[in-house]
Image: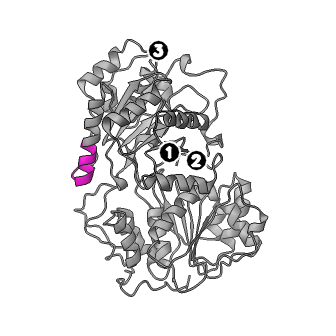
Amino acid sequence: MSHTNPATDSSTAEIPTEAPKLEESQDLDVHDAVPHKTFEDLGIKQAIIKAYLQDNITQPTKDQVQFYPEMMSLPPQNFIFEAPKNTHTWNLYLLAALCTVQEELPFVQAIVVAPTRERANTIYQEALKLSRYTAIRVKSLIPHKDMHDDQFGEEVTHHLVISIPTSLDDYLQHEDIDFSHVRTAIFDEAEEVFNRKKENVLSHSVPIISSLPETAQIILFSENLDGIYPAIRTNHIPDALQRSLNPTILSLKDVSQYYVVLSEEERPMFIKDLFETLTLKKIVVFISDKESAEKLVAELKAADLVANCVFGLNDMKLAEFRAIIRNYEKDKFPILISTIPLQYHLKALPTLCINYSIPYRAGTKAPDDDAYLKRLGRSDTFGGLGVGLTCIDDDAYDQMSYFGYALQTEIKELADFDDLGKAIKYADTLKNTHEWNTGAKPFQMSEESKEKATQKKSLKTDHTYDPSDIILLPDVHDIDEFFDNEDFNDPDDDVIPEDEDDSAPFPLE
């Protein structure tokens, strides 16, 4: 590869040609920012640093410190990054892509390809935020319901283009996009973009990588490197350096969690009473499906509360989704109801998030601990503190016990609003002062919770377990081990294997 790296702003420090090495004495949590390096040290454009500061991000992440200088070194090098599940990979590659762009040149200079519209939209929103003080033009080529063939015919000249394989290949075939000036090409979740088992995707992604100039830097991010079509690595990036990112983990360790027993009819008024008693500014309510969400919006409206709802892009136009999220973040309405996790769509979750009902695994009556974590869990990138509340039926104690068992966390029964108010005030106070400890903490279940977990009289099953086992098991996800009872699986339901479930409009990333 022989192309040269574009210069950054005149006010920007020179980009290092070697990756800085962390001192052995630096014992850092994988989510922590690295205090010994600044954005200026890395040679980041001042306009991008300004965007970070506006979002209260004052220091680069560990991955940015470790890998950004190497990605920007000369001569440019191809990379394959192994990215654990739930990693915010765009924190690294968008920084590199935007700092590669020469703003005065009206050409496509960087592309990002993601496997799904939802993932691509998340990346696009992040790119807009990060580039908002620059002259870099970002283009989304994400298809939606209202798009037709007449979208073609106008040449794309934006600096950074973000798309999915099918759409980007269509623009290539119509000769509406020119790759000859592309400096950096990034393929996110490459095990899906280049999945040999998905010929309908591979038939579009291979022409994209084949159309790139020889001088382009190609960077793949993948959770499963073995899932990438071998010919891609052999023919296009045989010299790629392989690196491993640190995971961005959703955690419940600093989330105070409660459950409350309510009938379906009682829940809307409970939310109203909660709002009025605790004088809340805003909350998020997670719900199972579109119909239930729209019904709840109507019920809250009848109770003089303003709410709105969002769904996956199969049920909602992209522009409408963006508008609702934007209005919620601008405090235009206080209650956002969602059928999907919102970690990648909101700048930050509100202090209180509510599960309107227990999340279940697709096609079963078994509780979904992964969905529970994605709804109520927090990332240390945006502050780990929060409060989670789950509304349950009077026969669902065992399901809540399972969440504590599988996720190694404590979930208390809500006694009154005062307890919830104290938890919210505690989280808000610490978030505002940034004095909480976000380091990993060993799980400890209180003696009271242990007793309640073993002595609940209203459990539906005769299954018992020793709560002390929770402390000894670092990663418990065997749902069959906990729910060895036919009551939790309806034989009339069609069980959809996770790897074949294409119904979820927003994949749980």
Q: Pick the residue in front: 113 or 393.
A: 393
Location of residue 402 with respect to 100 vertically, above or below: above
Label 1 CA crowd tier, 10 Å (few <14, some 14–19, many 20+): many
What segment is highlighted magenta in the picture? 426-436
Q: Quadrant of the N terminus?
A: bottom right
Contact (CB < 8 A) between labels 2 and 1? Answer: yes
At 35% across and 85% down in the image, what residue appears? Answer: 11
User: What's the magenta bit mostly, secondary-structure-wise?
Assistant: helix
Q: Which kind of residue does numbered mark 3 sit on?
A: Thr
Label 3 CA crowd tier, 10 Å (few <14, some 14–19, many 20+): few
Q: Pick the residue in front: 272 or 5.
A: 272
At 62% across and 50% down in the image, what residue appears? Answer: 313
Q: Tag on residue 506? A: 2
Give the Cα distance between marks 2 and 1. 8 Å
Q: Tag on residue 461? A: 3
User: Is residue 66 something that shows in the picture?
Assistant: no
Label 2 CA crowd tier, 10 Å (few <14, some 14–19, many 20+): some
At 25% across and 36% down in the image, what residue appears? Answer: 422
